[in-house]
């Protein structure tokens, strides 16, 4: 009879009563066989994770969300349920226990990792997973979580100022007298907010853009020292009086971004303004009528109040959350590298490179959205018991096999970096020669009536089809990949040799550079002649080629100036005579 009742209760998912029966059996030393005893114990243990998760109270960061005692919360997707409560407004207002809890804290960090930011805001691994997936929208000071470096050359230091004011909690009166029990059957929430800690937080992010790797390494240490001096500055004094000359220069170059729960007349953007705000922060919560916003709340499982309520079945393991976090940070690193490349003068000069980087960034953004949507689907299902953790592991596995994996993105970005560096080395050797960014600009020169001859060093392979970009495009167009559900169909990225890796092409480019440079220097003062650099697609002449235009018409796409000459061009009545006739060998 005991065994039958135990199994029945487990089937009905009333594990707390099943646990009680099992414990009573042990206390009363009922005569049950060792085999039945093991059966009961194993069955109970198998269900303990579910039972423990159902009955576990939670403490979470509010992250700027309007979470107040009495509000309902769904831990499956980390959202609160506005407008629906278990008690009427009068009960909540009259039966609140409240006490003051003043505390002030100040912290500094030079890390830009999400882990460090989450530690600042006391964000749990589970809540971090919801943030990464885009399930929750953060407000107030918590918007700091979304502030990431836009460049690999960026150095930063963050100062966090936090203060707590009071603590509010429900009393047992509410827990024992539910006004609206029908809410349990709706199964829209798993927990109720039973307590809240109020206060305010402020983050001031100090950024500096370095011009090179050596400077960045030096600045990263100095910026931390300069920011840490802010609390010790004389309240009435000038900040510059406490800084040496190098620190003053650094402070003037620093930009500041403010995220906070405080009401400021204007947000600081400079180092001096940040000092002024820091001095004012302690006085901003002295109004006895204003205690700030909820910064931390405590959640109580609804299943402990009624078995019909929805429950949080399982949490996401810290290991999988860490993998997801690392994966997204790697994607952001790739975006920063892309941004840095796009900002270089070389990429701005050569539109073919710029377009490829723009397409890459567009595909990256599309993929990141798809990936986060996949997280939004699987996280609530795992927490609600509809799926196992393997569903999240599968999404991560698909990513690792996709062309958007960190290794593949970095390989392509490294290739683009090398290509850009090659172009930069050539243009630096030809500093006085104009780089024409587009064919439209080249045509404007060709059809200029004052220009009779144009000699162009053409980079002919920049517009070659990019196999990696094509692979990314095909990946995103597949329905399977849009849902990130099919591992078996993920194909490897095809190997493709970049044009600049060819020894023969490299030799031809060196020769053309030498000829073009000598030729342009010999004719730099010749009237009606212009020398330019441009990107002109020409698969028949890979790498570079010297193009000769006469009267706006291409007359020689493989022009080879002679190495020794006295003069090149001869004009009579503004008419250019044939170059071949006057060139000396």
Image: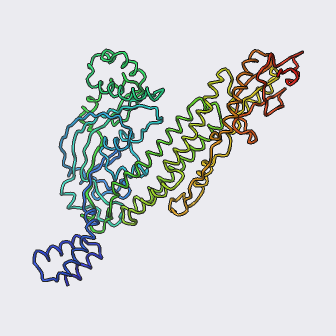
Query: Total label count?
Result: 0
Residue 493's place in the image compared with 184, above or below, is above
Residue 488's place in the image compared with 286, above or below, is below
Q: Quadrant of residue 76?
A: bottom left
| Position of residue 38 measured from the top left corner of the image (x, y, whole percent) | 21, 77
In the picture, measured across the screen, residue 39 lies left or right of residue 502, that is: left
In the picture, measured across the screen, residue 335 lies left or right of residue 20, that is: right
| Position of residue 56 measured from the top left corner of the image (x, y, whole percent) | 25, 59
> Which of 302/453 is in front?
453
Identity of the residue furthest to the bottom in this view: 1
In the picture, measured across the screen, residue 470 lies left or right of residue 36, that is: right
> Which of 178/445 is in front?
445
| Position of residue 210 measured from the top left corner of the image (x, y, whole percent) | 45, 27
- Which color scheme did the rendering employ for the protein? rainbow
> Which of 136/108 is in front?
108
**Quadrant in which the N terminus appears:** bottom left
Q: In which quarter of the image is residue 446?
A: top right
Residue sitting at 27 percent across and 17 percent down? Answer: 236
Residue 139's place in the image compared with 321, above or below, is above
Residue sitting at 35 percent across and 53 percent down? Answer: 80
| Position of residue 506 measured from the top left corner of the image (x, y, whole percent) | 66, 36
In the picture, measured across the screen, residue 462 lies left or right of residue 443, that is: left
Residue sitting at 20 percent across and 37 percent down? Answer: 102
Is residue 81 visible in the rendered image? The answer is: no
Identity of the residue furthest to the left in this view: 28
Q: In which quarter of the image is residue 57?
A: bottom left
**Quadrant in which the C terminus appears:** top right
> Which of 504/554 is in front?
504
Is residue 566 visible in the rendered image? The answer is: yes
């Amino acid at each position: 009879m005991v065994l039958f009742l135990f199994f029945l209760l487990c089937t009905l998912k009333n594990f707390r009563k099943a646990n009680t029966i099992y414990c009573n059996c042990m206390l009363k030393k009922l005569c049950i066989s060792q085999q039945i005893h093991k059966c009961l114990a194993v069955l109970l243990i198998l269900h303990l994770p579910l039972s423990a998760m159902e009955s576990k109270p939670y403490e979470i960061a509010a992250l700027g969300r309007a979470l107040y005692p009495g509000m309902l919360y769904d831990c499956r997707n980390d959202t609160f349920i506005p407008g629906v409560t278990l008690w009427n407004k009068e009960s909540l207002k009259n039966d609140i226990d409240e006490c003051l809890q003043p505390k002030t804290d100040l912290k500094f960090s030079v890390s830009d990792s999400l882990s460090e930011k989450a530690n600042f805001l006391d964000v749990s691994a589970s809540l971090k997973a919801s943030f990464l997936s885009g399930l929750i929208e953060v407000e107030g000071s918590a918007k700091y979580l979304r502030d990431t470096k836009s460049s690999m050359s960026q150095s930063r230091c963050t100062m966090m100022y936090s203060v707590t004011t009071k603590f509010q909690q429900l009393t047992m009166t509410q827990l024992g007298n539910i006004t609206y029990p029908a809410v349990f059957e709706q199964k829209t929430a798993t927990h109720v907010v039973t307590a809240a800690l109020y206060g305010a937080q402020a983050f001031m992010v100090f950024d500096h853009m370095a011009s090179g790797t050596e400077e960045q390494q030096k600045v990263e240490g100095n910026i931390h020292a300069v920011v840490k001096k802010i609390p010790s500055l004389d309240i009435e004094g000038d900040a510059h009086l406490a800084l040496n000359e190098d620190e003053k220069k650094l402070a003037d170059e620093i930009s500041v971004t403010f995220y906070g729960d405080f009401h400021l007349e204007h947000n600081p953007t400079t180092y001096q303004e940040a000092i002024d705000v820091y001095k004012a922060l302690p006085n901003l919560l002295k109004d006895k009528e204003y205690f700030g916003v909820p910064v931390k709340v405590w959640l109580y499982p609804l299943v402990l109040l009624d078995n019909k309520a929805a429950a949080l079945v399982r949490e996401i393991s810290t290991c999988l959350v860490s993998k997801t976090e690392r994966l997204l940070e790697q994607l952001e690193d790739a975006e920063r590298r892309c941004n840095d490349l796009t900002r270089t003068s070389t990429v701005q000069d050569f539109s073919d490179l710029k377009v490829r980087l723009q397409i890459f960034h567009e595909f990256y953004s599309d993929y990141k959205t798809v990936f986060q949507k996949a997280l939004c689907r699987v996280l609530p299902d795992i927490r609600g018991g509809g799926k196992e953790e393997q569903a999240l592991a599968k999404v991560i596995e698909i990513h690792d096999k996709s062309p958007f994996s960190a290794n593949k993105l970095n390989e392509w970005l490294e290739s683009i970096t090398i290509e850009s560096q090659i172009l930069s080395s050539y243009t630096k050797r030809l500093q006085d020669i104009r780089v024409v960014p587009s064919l439209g600009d080249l045509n404007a020169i060709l059809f200029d009536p004052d220009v009779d001859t144009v000699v162009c060093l053409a980079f002919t392979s920049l517009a070659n089809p990019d196999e990696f970009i094509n692979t990314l495009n095909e990946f995103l167009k597949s329905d399977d990949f849009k849902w990130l559900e099919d591992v078996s169909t993920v194909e490897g990225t095809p190997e493709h040799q970049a044009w600049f890796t060819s020894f023969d092409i490299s030799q031809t480019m060196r020769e053309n550079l030498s000829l073009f440079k000598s030729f342009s220097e010999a004719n730099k003062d010749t009237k009606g002649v212009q020398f330019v650099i441009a990107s002109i697609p020409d698969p028949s002449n890979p790498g570079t080629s010297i193009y000769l235009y006469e009267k706006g018409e291409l007359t020689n796409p493989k022009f080879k100036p002679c190495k020794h000459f006295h003069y090149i061009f001869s004009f009579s009545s503004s008419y250019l005579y044939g170059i071949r006739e006057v060139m000396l060998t």
